[in-house]
Amino acid sequence: MHARVAATVLRAAARPAILSRARVAPMFIRPASGHAQETFEQFSDRYVKFFQSAEDLFEVQRGLNNCFAHDLVPSPEVITAAVQAARRVNCYATAVRIFEGVKEKVENKQQYQAYVDELKPLREELGKLELIL
């Protein structure tokens, strides 16, 4: 009996394994070129418009979260629009966090100082933001 089992196993091993191979159905592939690369100017314009139309604190904070999630530092125009939106919804803490976010995103202190210098008229206009450096 062991000889019969061994012969069956050897015969099965000698057969081509056509049926045991997984069959792969052809797939239809669509080109994924639906999204164009956004330029920095388009990014800035999009967020300036967003912050100008934000109506409540949740929208401002959601926009800030999305804006700062990108791998770039927002332009001074975006920062200005965001701080003005924070002022419009009456949230000083959010305005402070905007400057803290810029401080974290820039590569060095000189870049942050350049942002602070460029945004000085905004800080003077809003008053209490003079304390942020």
Image: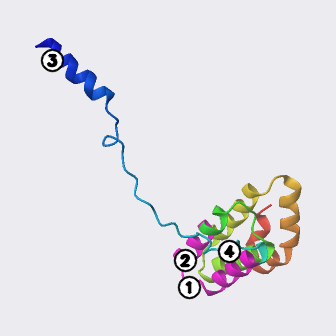
Q: Secondary structure at mark 3?
A: helix
- Along the line of sight, the residue nearer the viewer: 83 or 28: 28
Q: Secondary structure at mark 1?
A: loop
Quarter placement of the N terminus: top left
> Of callouts 3 and 1, which one flags the residue occurring earlier in the amino acid sequence?
3
Image location (x, y in percent) of residue 50: 63, 82
Quarter placement of the C terminus: bottom right
Residue at the location (67% across, 70% down)?
Answer: 95
Total labels drawn: 4
Nearer mark to the viewer, of 4 and 2: 4
Residue 55 located within the stretch drawn in magenta: yes
- Read off the residue under disc 2: 59
How crowded is the residue under tag 1: few (<14 C-alpha within 10 Å), some, or many (20+)?
some
Identified by mark 2, the residue type is Glu
Image location (x, y in percent) of residue 100: 71, 60
- Read off the residue under disc 3: 4
Label 4 to label 3: alpha-carbon separation: 67 Å
- Read off the residue under disc 1: 55
> Of callouts 4 and 2, which one flags the residue occurring earlier in the amino acid sequence?
4
Label 1 to label 2: alpha-carbon separation: 7 Å
* 59 to the left or right of 35: left
- Read off the residue under disc 4: 36
Label 3 to label 2: alpha-carbon separation: 77 Å
> Of callouts 4 and 3, which one flags the residue occurring earlier in the amino acid sequence?
3
Identified by mark 1, the residue type is Glu
Nearer mark to the viewer, of 3 and 2: 3
Q: Is residue 117 above or below residue 1?
A: below
Dot 4 and dot 3 residues touching (CB under 8 Å): no
Q: Which region shows up in magenta?
A: 42-65
